[in-house]
Amino acid sequence: MLASWPIPALLFAFTLAALVVLVSGLRMTSLVDRLADRMGIGEAIAGAVLLGAATSLSGTIVSITVALDGQASMAYSNSIGGIAAQTAFLAIADVAYRRANLEHAAADLANIFQAITLIVLLTLPLLAGTLAEFTVIAIHPVSLVIPVIYVGALVATRALREMPMWRPVDTRDTRNDMPERESAAARQITTLRLLLHFLLLMLLMGIAGWTIAKTAGSITARLALSETLVGALATAVVTSMPELVTTIAAVRRGALQLAVGGIIGGNTFDTLFLTAADIAYRDGSLYHAATVSDQFWTLTAILMTGILLSGLILRQRNGPGGIGVETIAILVVYAGAITFQVMGATGG
């Protein structure tokens, strides 16, 4: 049906779906913060699981939809490009948080462990692509390993939170994860009602994600654009916008562990896009259909995550202009990656 739409109509539908994703993601932040307090799971884990999965839903739908349509490169680059974009968004949040370096103030072992997990998960697609192609029912074995590692890491993160073997040093700039006191009116809203509201927003984001995938696929085919360029810099950035909004909103609320955990957890969740896309892609292994440009974004995401991890461990309190050196490095790497990608796609 969309194939017959004119370009302006496709762009309008794409923009409208992007706005739905943005508004829904914004409303999720306060919901997840309250659910974290009520369920006693902590902001870092809530960010990794609830906020990360919810804000990534539209991106998941995009990867599955374009993979079903045979657009392997866009499916792959949408996942990895989103990870790079969201890491850059965390750097932007650090710029917005003026009291101290965000990675210093949001010290949390769970976020460090999740970042390590993310680096491990990002190496698996690269390893799969270097080996001879082997699939079972057109699914590469790595696609089955990724969710196992993801779930195992979540279990380990919960155990780590309950019985940490070491703790970050508290300073006057450290913001600890403490449950907030709810007002009498807020306490009258049941946890079940909050969860239902959360699920409704997820549904809206899923529908918007499908719309983004279909319109982006049609625009790409119509204008003969690079799938990698559209996936990494259009659909990935658009579907990642909730992470930017929710991260800055969480920072403004003082929920710093939720802000960092939402990005890192969302990035870890985004690796599951690859599993879903590989299952949906029926022409063989998604990892072998990926291009060199797609692998470029995988390496960029690993580099950016490594820089972020170093900042979480080093915990520089104040850097140039009140932001961490790792923030500057992340933004420089991301800007450089975009520049090289655009130049490569345009032959510059």
Image (cartoon, rainbow, N blue to C red):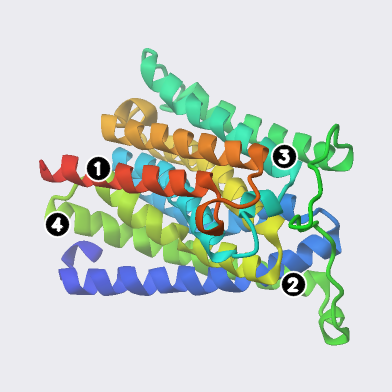
As drawn, 197 above or below 321: below
Q: Amino acid at mark 1?
A: Gln
Q: Earlier in the sequence, mark 4 or mark 1?
A: 4
Residue 36 image offset from top left, x and y in percent = 78, 60
Residue 68 shows in the view = no
Residue type indicated by callout 3:
Leu
Outermost residue to the left:
347
Q: Is residue 127 left or right of residue 260?
A: left
Can you tell which of label 3 and label 4 is closer to the viewer?
Answer: 3
Residue that badge 2 annotates: 194
Which quadrant holds the N terminus? bottom left
What is the secondary structure assignment of the residue under circle 1? helix
Nearer the observer: mark 1 or 3; the answer is 1
Q: Which residue is located at x 43 percent, y 66 percent?
A: 208
| Image x and y of residue 78, in percent | 38, 47
Q: Report which residue position mark 1 lands on.
A: 341
Circle 4 is placed at which residue position? Answer: 222
Q: CA distance from mark 1 to mark 2?
A: 42 Å
Instruction: Using the rendered image of the protein, determine whether residue 108 is visible from the camera's viewpoint.
Output: yes
**Disc 1 packing (10 Å; few <14; some 14–19; many ≥20):** many
Tell which of 212 and 298 is nearer to you.
298
In the picture of the structure, the residue carrying the numbered disc 3 is 154
- Marks 3 and 4, Cα distance to the nearest angstrom? 42 Å
Across and down, in percent, residue 184 comes to 88, 85
Judge from the rendering whether residue 42 lies leftward or rightward of residue 64; answer left or right. right
